[in-house]
Image (cartoon, rainbow, N blue to C red):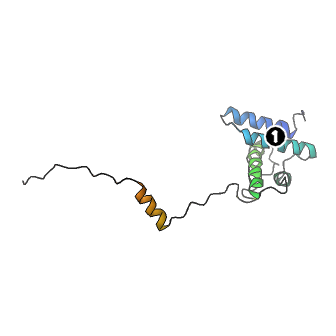
């Protein structure tokens, strides 16, 4: 695992470079190190392939598909960086395992909700104006 061409070393180099640019990469860093461990264990990290990235991202098999997509996005960002140094690196397509985020549905507006909202605020006071236009 300490040889300079191991996936672990490549991930460490990537994380060091990104952190030197100011990124914290706490969760992403931990996930990438897990990926590197997986790749080094199976001996398939040279070059990085979409197949390897997808197999790792889909672990555990009973996880939420959005979790898989987030893991693949993490490897995808690393693969884009890695492709600069190794053109044979395969970059997983964006959205390959579906969206990596879920937008929450905003609450629907009903007449009752609008009424409550309208009456929950105190009425705005209108400033008195003592200005009376003078005839010219």
User: Whole-percent x and y of residue 71?
Assistant: 77, 50
- Badge 1 density bin: few <14, some 14–19, many ≥20, Cα 10 Å: some
Residue reaching furthest right? 42
**Up/down of 64 relative to 130, above or below:** below
- Please name whichever residue, 96 or 86, is drawn nearer the observer in this view of the structure: 96
The N terminus - image quarter = top right
- Total numbered badges shown on the rendered structure: 1
Secondary structure, mark 1, is helix
**Residue at 56% from the left image edge and 61% from the top image edge:** 107
**Residue at 75% from the left image edge and 36% from the top image edge:** 15
* Left or right of 54 on screen, residue 66: left
**Up/down of 92 relative to 109, above or below:** above
Residue reaching furthest left? 136
User: Whole-percent x and y of residue 25?
Assistant: 71, 39
* Left or right of 59 on screen, residue 107: left
User: Whole-percent x and y of residue 116?
Assistant: 45, 60
**Residue at 69% from the left image edge and 36% from the top image edge:** 24
The residue indicated by pointer 1 is 33
Residue reaching furthest bottom? 111
The quadrant in which residue 14 appears is: top right
User: Whole-percent x and y of residue 85?
Assistant: 78, 41
**Residue at 92% from the left image edge and 43% from the top image edge:** 41
């Amino acid at each position: 695992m300490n040889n300079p061409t191991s996936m672990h070393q490549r991930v460490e180099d990537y994380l060091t470079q990104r952190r030197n640019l100011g990124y914290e990469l706490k969760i992403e860093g931990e996930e990438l190190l897990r990926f590197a461990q997986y790749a080094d264990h199976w001996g398939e990290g040279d070059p990085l392939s979409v197949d390897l990235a997808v197999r790792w991202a889909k672990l555990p098999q009973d996880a939420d598909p959005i979790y898989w997509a987030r893991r693949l996005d993490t490897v995808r960002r690393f693969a884009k960086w890695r492709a600069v140094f190794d053109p044979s690196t395969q970059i997983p397509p964006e959205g390959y395992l579906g969206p990596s985020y879920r937008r929450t549905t905003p609450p629907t507006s009903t007449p009752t909700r609008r009424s409550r909202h309208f009456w929950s605020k105190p009425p705005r006071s209108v400033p008195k104006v003592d200005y009376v236009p003078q005839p010219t």
